[in-house]
Amino acid sequence: MKKIVVTAVMIATLLILGTGLAYGATGISQWDVDEGLKFCAEYPVNLALNGQQVAFSQKDVPPVIVKETTLIPARALFEKMGGTVTWQDATQSVYVKYDTTEVVLTIGSDKALVNGQLQSLDVPPMIIDDDDDYYGSTMIPVRFTAEALGCTVAWQDSTRSVLVSSPSKQEAPVVYPDDTDDDSDNQNNGQNNNPTTNPDTTNTTWAYEQLNAAAKGKTVFIDIGHGGKDGGSLGHKGQSDQLQEKDVNLPIGVKLNEYLRSAGVNTYLIRSTDIYYTLLERSEKANTAGATIFISIHNNSSETASAKGTEVLYNSKTNAAGATEMDLYGITSKNIAENVQKQLVAELGTNSRGIKNSPEMAVLNKTAMPAIIVEGAFLSNESDLALIRRDDYADRYALAVAKGIIQSMNQAFK
């Protein structure tokens, strides 16, 4: 949101202020702004929404920290989140709306309105021109605005990143089975909304490494990436044979559930139909289920058509008390990632891109238990896409992941 900042009024104001207070009543000076720009030019601030990097246009002023408050261009984050951002020139105000909440921020004011209620700001919104082109970006405090809209906000010092998670909002009905036995709680909730995936009726049999007795009773949460209004990555975008990632992921997750159940593993399948859940909802469901392992089924994409192969993302967690995954769950996400990666590459014959520690991914940092994201192959690569389109792809993908999970559980629980 760029604004022409050189008007007669602004010139006069700057001439009067000189190097004094730029936002008089707030205690913020032009020196504070300049120092923030200088520091963040050398040590840039990143912004992620639900684990995905938020990109800014070349015309935007990048995120800047002014007196320990991070300011960002108004539109980039909140429009990506599905909100609306409008500018009221007469009052020099920004209106940010998401769902039923509206935040009104006025340039230079340390007061904001949240659904009509007055609240105080540590640092006011401002128009910043970082390159002296006489145009500036409308910059607003990210934590205040995001939290007012119901988001969770965290700072990751190692990557200098602001991590924003969308509010938990029910986008579609959560369907629980009506015909399960009393002892099925936290094992299969949410997966029987399609009777064809009921593990009691599946014909899938398991003829591979058997689950150790000590591993029985541990729950594996199966998250099927994307769904509903979120189609995920696209293969052959805009062409007659366009393929959505969500349609690839769904049969893989359903088949994985069948394989694991037939091997004696307790499972919680988040969905078996085309339903949308936010990333925060997925994590909360896994935490509520008391799962031991979280696995998210995906396929990949890249702007570079040559990128191809399989990779598994994980996050080696330590809680606030210093306890590790091994301390708390007796198994680690890294070990699960290694085993699943090896099994997938062997089964699919894909290029191995290795495993990657990815704490910035929302479902990896919001889940309490060891968690991995599996990226089977690239929809953006022609050879990988041909593999994905094969009739046996879902079955082979699911079988390999099931083998990797059972191998990991048997190694951990003897």
Image (tube, rainbow, N blue to C red):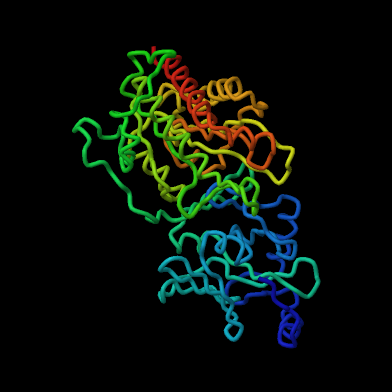
Identify the image quadrant of residue 259: top left
Residue found at the far left of this picture: 182
Identify the image quadrant of residue 193: top left
**Which percent across, then down, holds residue 64?**
66, 59
**Which percent across, then down, holds residue 250?**
46, 40
Comparing 331 with 200, the one in front is 200
**Which percent across, then down, holds residue 312?**
57, 31
Query: How many marks on residues?
Result: 0
Q: Say above or below: 273 vs 33.
A: above
Quadrant (top left/top right/bottom left/bottom right) for the C terminus: top left
User: Does residue 385 appear to the left or right of 296 in the view shown?
Assistant: right
**Which percent across, then down, holds residue 23?**
63, 75
Comparing 154 with 360, the one in front is 360
Residue in view at x 72 percent, y 66 percent: 31
Comparing 411 with 203, the one in front is 203
Residue in view at x 66 percent, y 59 percent: 63
Q: Say above or below: 38 vs 138.
A: above
Comparing 312 with 17, the one in front is 312
Q: Say above or below: 164 vs 205.
A: below
Quadrant (top left/top right/bottom left/bottom right) for the N terminus: bottom right
